[in-house]
Structures are given as C-alpha cells and as structure tokens.
Image: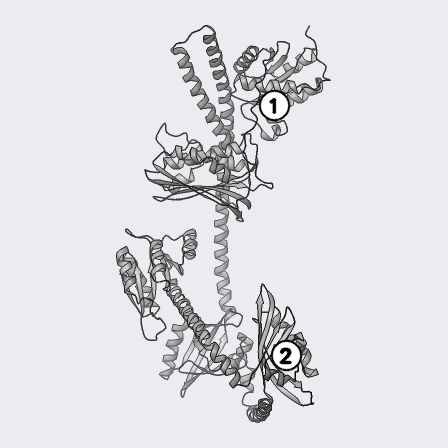
Amino acid sequence: MASDPSIPGRPIRILLLEDSDMDAELLAAHLDKARIAFEAKRVMRRADFVAALEEGGWDIILADYSLPEFDGLSALTIARAMQPDIPFLFVSGVVGEEFATNALKRGATDYVMKRNLSRLPTALERALEQAQDRVERRRTEEALRHSEMSARLATEAAHLGIWDLELRTGRFTCDERCRSLFGLVSTAGGGREALLTGCHPDDRARMERAIERAIDPTVEQGGHFGEQYRIILPDGRERWVATHGQAIFESDICVRFLGAVRDITEEKRASEALRDLATALEQQVAERTAERDRIWRLSADLFSVIGFDGRLRRLNPAWQQMLGYDADRLVGSSISLLIHPDDRDGLENAVRQLSAGRKVDRLETRLRHLDGSWRWISWTAAPEGDAFYAVGRDVTSEKQASASLAERNRELANQIEERERVEYTLRQMQRLEAVGQLTAGVAHDFNNLLTVILGNIGFVERSLERLGIQDRALERLGHMRMAAERGAKLTAQLLAFSRRQKLEPKPVDLNETVSGMRDLLQSTMGGSVQLKTNLNPGLWPALVDPTQIELIILNLAINARDAMDVGGMLTVETFNIRHAKQPRRPEEPSPGDYVVLAVSDTGSGMNEEVLAKAFEPFFTTKEIGKGSGLGLPQVYGFAKQSGGGVSIDTRLGEGTTIRVYLPRAAGTAQQPGGQEPATAPEPGRDDHIVLLVDDDAAVRDVTASMLRDLGYHVIDAGNGSSALELLRSGQAVDLLLVDYAMPGMNGAELARAAGQLRPGLPTVFITGYADLKALREIGEERVVRKPFQDNELQLRLAGALSHRPSNVVRFQRS
C-alpha cells in the first residue's frame, strides 16, 4: 500500500524504474536542488518492480518509458492493478504527444521530458498533492457517512427547525419546531410562499432573490442558501431567524430545496451591541492615529511590517492599489505565498541577513497580483526588534521593456521558422504535382504502346486459332498478353498517383467492405501473419469509389505483410474523425469530417529518410523485382482525388500505421448486392460506318482492324481537321470514335465541331489518360480506356448506337 506523504519531516519514498545510471543521478540532482528530501529505490526488471510494489510504502513511482527488459506502459498497468493510489510519473526522453495522451488515459499522473528535468520537482510535488487530496477526499466521505446520525442529534440539540420544499409539486413540509417558529398551522403545501411565511416586508424582496439564486443551476454557488431575516408572528411580535438550505439538482433542474432554521433574535441583539462598541473604539483609534498614518496611507510604494517568520503584520493601502488584495485580509499570512517560486530562495537569504541585523537593499522579487499576473518589486528593508520594515517599489514596467525586446526577437525567430516550414511544404507539393504530371504523360504514351501490343497479340491469337495451330506459339502469346496486362495495371497505378483515374464515388459502408474482404485478406496474409479488425459500429458512410477502395485496402494489406516477419499482426481499423488541423504536408487532409481507414502492422517501421520519400512513385525499399514502388503513391493519389488525405505514423522496430482519410458522405451507404450481368452486345453490322480518329498511326491501325473484325465499316483520319473534312464532304457516318488526347484539336473539341455538322451523331472517346473535369459530363459508357479489349470496345459502340436519336438523318454512301 502507499505511504502517507503528508507526514512532516519524513522524506518522500520514490520507486524509480530506470536503467541509466546517468539519468538516475540527474533525477536525484534535480530533486536535491529543489530541496526535496527523498529516499529512492531503483529497479530495472519486471520481477524487481513487482517485488518492490509488494513491499509497499512508496509515495510515488518515477518510470522511464523504454528499458531493455521492461517498459513503462507495462509498469503502469502493473502499478494501477497492485497499488492504484500511488501517483505514477513518466520521466522519459522519447515521450511524444500521442504516447503522453495514451499514458494519461491509462492512469499516469503526469509526464516529464528528460531534456526538461527542471519541471520534475514541480510535477512530483503536484502529483503528491493530488494523491493526498484523493486520500483526504475519501476520509471526508467516510466521515460524512459517520456524521449523518450525529447531525440529526445535533439538529435537535441546537433547536433547529427542518424544512423541505419539493419544487415539482410545490409541496412544503417542516417539523414541529419549524411550524412553531413560523406560526404555521398546516404541515404541507403552500410552495415557496410557505417558506416566506411571516417574512418582514422590508426583507421579502431580498429573500425572494436569494431563493431564486439558490435554485438556479446557472448561478455558481452550488445551490447553497443562507440568509438572516425578520419574521412577524401572528401575535405581532418581530423575531430574527437564520436559515440555511441546499438545492438539489437533477439534469440542471432544481427538484428539491431543503434546510434548517433557528431563532437568532438574542444573538442579533448581542451582535449589534458588540458592533456598536467596536465602531466606537475604531473611531477613537482612528482619531488618535490619523496624522501618523497619513504617509502610510498615501504612499504609492508598498509599506509593510513583517516578522522574521515571514508573517505579514501591517500593510499600507498601496498593496491593494498595486496588487489588488485587501491589505487587511493579507495580514497574518506568509509573504512567501505571494512570492514567485523561483524567488523564494532569494527571500529566505534576505530574511537571514535581516535576522543578523544587516540592512537589505535592491532585492528584486515577483509578487502575484490578484488577477494572477506578476509584479516585479524592488525592496529595501531594515530590521527592528523581532520584525523588519520593508518598502517596495514597482519596477514591472522596466522589466517588461527588457522582456518585450527579447519576446520580439523570439517572435521573429518563430516567423522565420514558420515561413521555412510553409516554403518546404510548398516545394513538396510542387514536386509531387510535377511528378504527377510527368507520370500522367508517361501513362498516356505507355497506354498507346500497350493498345498496339495487346491488339496485335489478339489478332495473332485469333489467326492461329482459325488455322487450327495449337503449339507453344499460342502459349508464348499468352505470356506476352499477361506481361502487357501487367503493364496496363502499372499505368493504372501511375494514373492513380497523378489523380487522373476515373472515379465513381458513392456512399459506402467501409465496415461492410472490410468485412466482405476478410477472407481475401486472410488468404493474402497466408498463415504467417494474424489479421485483426476493429470496426466502429457507428461509422459514417464514406464517399468513395467502391471498387477502388477495395484495391486500396488490399494494396495496404500486402505492403504491411511484406514489412513483417512470421508471427506479425495486421490490424484494419475504421473510425470517424472531425479533423480541425490545417495540413502541414501535401498528403495530409484539410479540416473536415472524415471516415478513417487505418491499416497497422508490427513490422520494421520506417526511418525519416524513407518516410520522406514514401509517396514518391517508383521508390521502394523492397528487393529488385519484388515491388513496383507504386503502392503508396496509388493510395496517395486515390485519397487526394477522393477529397481526403493520408498520414503515416511509424516507429523503427515497432511498426507502421497508415491512415486514409475519406470524405464523409451526406447520404446513407449503399447496401452491397450483385448487379444484373451485362448482356453481351451483338456484333456490329457492316452497314454501320465508324469514323475513327487517332493521331497515332499504330493505334489507329490496330483499332481499325478490331472494328472490322467486329463487323463495322471503318473510315479513319489522323487528326481532327481531316475528320471534319470527311464530315463536310457528305460521307455517311454512324458513329465517331475519337482519341481524346491529340495535338492541335483534341477529341472533345472535335466532338463539339462534329455535333454542329451532324447533330445527334454518337461519339465515343478513346483515352490513355483523361482530363477528368472535361469528361465528367460525358459518362463512363462513352469512354473506352487504353489498352482495351475488343469486347469492351464492342460494348461501348453498341451502347452508343442503341441510344442514337431516331430523327438523325443518315447520309448514304455513294
């Protein structure tokens, strides 16, 4: 059990959990410097710590966060279980804001950084005071329970009358003595009016206001009621009574008001007589000392008479003018209560000098003002008898002028630091934006190449199948197709980073998404990593693309798995957050409501160098051939394009947590369910004429061959101007198939011009990457993404032709 640190003269017993000899000596040195008497026992291992707790008698526990064979959080858990009353302070060099908050939630009293050990004495004393307060509170509660019966006996012995008013019903009840005192006949009813029975007219308004304040929950007096007033009895006699009561509140509503009343008529008369006598004596003293005290009263400096024990004996009015205190109320208290803690040693030295009969000049100390501020006072003091006379002059303005210059220098340094931080953030954002534009261009050109490769592979495969050839050539073509499709996935990741992928955000329940992927995640982890989910039951719907968020979850899970050894733990967590902080890094979210997806691992963590490059495309710490370096960039691009952000919390040797902030949806989440399978489109008819426009000759050739294989008649053009010439010539065209990104006139501009020449002409866009703002109103059903398969192309063309207006005039072929 804990010892009692309030016993005077007994040193504080400290249980110290610390493995560093140097740090232990520094702790002891700071406590010695603060003149704190203590006895410390130092332990480093769990078994020694538990044994010391079982031994008991400790006033406080000081613990480092990290030890070779133990850790501070485990020690905190053990201490709270074995000795919950002992205050627990963390003294560590690695405590961060998140750890400190977590430690305080788990029961730690406070924490002190090792680089700021000057705070240790103050933190230790405050922790001991809080522990003593808790002990005293329990003692008080126990004493209160034992005194309830005594209170009832005391009520009768003190001739008190008891009354009780129920505010909800207006029922007023009182005992026999109270009825006799007020002259009441009935024992119940009457409400507040019964409480004021017989109240003197001159006191009634004051009593009504006092009752209103007592039963008003917004008035900061705790519902306490205490007044003295006059009553007029039925026989005309006037009596003084004192009543004390307490209001009882439920949900900020006063439901009951009860108290006691007693007759104080004789006490009042005696008090008035005594007050009259005191007034007469005070007047006599004032008349005799008026001249002598004039300088004392009018001086703007602090005049005081102080005993060598530090007790204030006399103070002039300047104490109130300068410090705001009532000078009379300060008399008898210790001057050290007003002295700044850092100046008390200087005061003690000055008192010793005065006790030895020597004068003190220009002693500067800080005194606390009534409003909590501090005033610098320059003292001159001289001893006389068993006290000393001191005069203090306010030098706060002089001190503030000096401090103001230092503060301005600090502000300037802070402004420079903030500007450097903003400039760094801007450079990072510009760098990522530049890389994003570069990767988008690379993806576009790469998609054109993949379109040609995949299209020609398809032609060769179909040709070999028609010839009945079944040899290793087809197998090798399959390998080529797989490699090309892997390249297509790579370009999709590049587009995700550059935020140019096409998203279809919908309200999604992330809990259902994660639950539905649990089997997939578990199989992905294999048997070497455990999977744990913490899903918030009150989770908001998130506004995201349902397909892309599943890929993001799987992507993060695979990254986490690769960072862990056998026996690791993967945790997937969801929760809501109202984010109020402005972003300090490009990947962080702006203020707002977000649904957070957090994926944590117990792997190796990241150092500062790796963390700084985590979102750069193609950067990876994996072995060659085992990672593309596009996993986290894809997460970053998806989150920012969705309107959210990403943050990484990592520690070397402990693991990493990646939090994806997704915007909160206004509606409700869509329930998962299968969609009707799309009906396979019918082959095109030879009488359907497609005008194909693409600036890349190879892509145009492959696409035209696909269209002819699908049964369409194809007319091709290498740019927008050539296509418009064909339309102006009267050439029959049923559908315009155009590449979006072309030099000169792009696909969107060509479609608008073609619409003016041929109103209602269906248009389908081919794109390697897209300006999402420009294509936002077009619709996914009218966009074919490179590289594409012939069935996907046929689906888009058939859909566009089926929605062609019936009143469109079709030009006949000549």
Q: Is residue 387 magenta?
A: no
Name the amino acid, label 1. Answer: Arg
Q: Is residue 650 magenta?
A: yes
Horizontal and vertical percent position of residue 478: 42, 16
Name the amino acid, label 2. Answer: Thr
Q: Is residue 653 left or right of residue 297?
A: left
Q: First in sequence: mark 2 or mark 1?
A: 2
Q: Which residue is mark 1?
A: 782
Tell me the crowding category of disc 1: few under 14, some 14 to 19, or many 20 or more residues within 10 angstroms, Cα based.
Answer: some
Magenta-tinted stretch: 649-655
- Which residue sits at x=68%, y=78%? 205
Q: Secondary structure at mark 1?
A: helix
Which disc number belongs to residue 516? none
CA gap, disc 2 and disc 1: 88 Å
- Which residue sits at x=39%, y=77%? 350
| Residue 158 can be seen in this image | yes
Q: Is residue 130 left or right of residue 287?
A: left
Count how many numbered circles sit on residues in the image.
Answer: 2
The type of colouring in the image is one colour
Q: Is residue 754 above or below residue 14?
A: above
Q: Is residue 282 above or below residue 150?
A: below
Image quadrant occupied by the C terminus:
top right
2 and 1 marks in contact (CB < 8 Å): no
Q: Is residue 566 above or below residue 756?
A: below
Q: Is residue 470 left or right of residue 797?
A: left
Tell me the crowding category of disc 2: few under 14, some 14 to 19, or many 20 or more residues within 10 angstroms, Cα based.
Answer: some
| Residue 744 can be seen in this image | no
Location of residue 529 by image quarter: top left
Q: Which residue is mark 2?
A: 187
